[in-house]
Amino acid sequence: MLRLPGKLSAEKFLADHWQKDYLFMPQALDRLRPAISRNELGWLATLDDVESRLVFTNRSDGRVRYHAETGPFDEEYLAALPKRDWTLLVHDVEKHLPAMRKLLAHVPFIPDWRIDDLMVSFAAPGGGVGPHQDNYDVFLCQGIGIREWHVAMGSVDEDPDASDDLALTEEFQGQQHTAREGDVLYLPPGVPHWGTATRACITYSIGMRAPQLSDLVAEFLNTDENNPFYSDSDLNPGEAQSGRISAHAVDRAVRLLGARPNQRAEVAEALGRYVTATKDWITPEGASTGDAAGILERLSQGASINVHGMARMAYDEHSIYLNGRQMPLPDRVDTFVSELCATRRIQGPLPAIGAIAEVVAWIAKSGGFALPET
């Protein structure tokens, strides 16, 4: 877990900072492990199913401008990049390299279904993505190298001259922080910020997933109103149970939608489906009925199986959710599902019939397991 500064507890962090105020945390982490190298990040950026971007910093006539290119990229192109003024960003690293998921454990006081992905960036000296603001919470964990951060204390106007492929604000000075290995910057939604590498650096970004009203249940929309994002500024550490979408979270979604009490179950399912939905190009393939039966047979004999690295899983008091799909949660299975969300692994022997077997078969058919190659 992060070493919060001073005597700040997880409860106090949530009360004073979560979705309220940014926090710079010097030496909040030891050396990040597991880590990823520049070459490994570059290799990911050459793959067709990996979302990656290059952002270039152009300095001329006393002005700084940014433009982006999207991957995948050729190895030769990456090898020929200049010595400075660019950043490579790779999304969903923990899905492509499941071992990297361990870094998400540094924020155990945040419900894991709220975490969207681990984005990793490599910045050459002078590299950055420009001044901007995000619509989600993020923990920016500094790996090797040094990055200078600027954080605005108020609103900043959009940059009308920014490239169409980047949503940037005007430059500002704000509060300045020098991030070295082990330092962490927490940013709530909507806080303008920008970082520039003063020495080649790698940054690990733990970003959150926050549905908008329109992402949940379209039929509840009032088109005369705005389209707010889900928020949980009243989050408490007790909600951070592996995989569990708390009753408080559902209540917040009900309020966001302005739903009626008799629509609560429908809202809960919409929330569960959304927060476990996966991107089309990395959605795991489901097992056939025969393969699912084979998994149950092997588990009954003591084998083990891992949850697919790209699968997203959660549950609430009534349902289990996986990759945007929903299944009613059988009685007395929530402990099994919680442990599966926590460990992302099933170790047999497991009964080949019964409620747990039913859940396992559904998970297999929904793309929840890393199937053995044949």
Image (cartoon, rainbow, N blue to C red):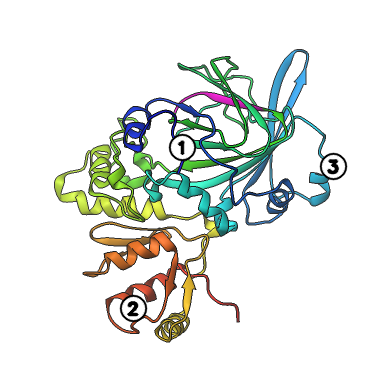
Mark 3, residues whose alpha carbon is within 10 Å: few (<14), some, or many (≥20)?
few
Disc 1 element: loop
Q: Which residue is mark 1?
A: 3
Disc 2 and disc 3 in contact, CB within 8 angstroms? no
Front position in the image: 116 or 304:
304
Q: Residue furthest front?
A: 7
Disc 1 and disc 2 in contact, CB within 8 angstroms? no
Specify the segment rendered in magenta.
190-196
Looking at marks 1 and 2 on the same chain, the residue that comes earlier in the sequence is marked by 1
Above or below 225: residue 30: below
| Residue visible at 51% across and 23% down in the picture | 192
Looking at marks 1 and 3 on the same chain, the residue that comes earlier in the sequence is marked by 1
Front position in the image: 145 or 263:
145
Alpha-carbon distance for marks 1 and 3?
A: 39 Å
Tell me the kind of residue under disc 3: Ala
Q: Quadrant of the N terminus?
A: top left
Q: Which residue is mark 3?
A: 80
Q: Position of residue 342 (x, y in %)?
A: 40, 59
Disc 3 element: loop
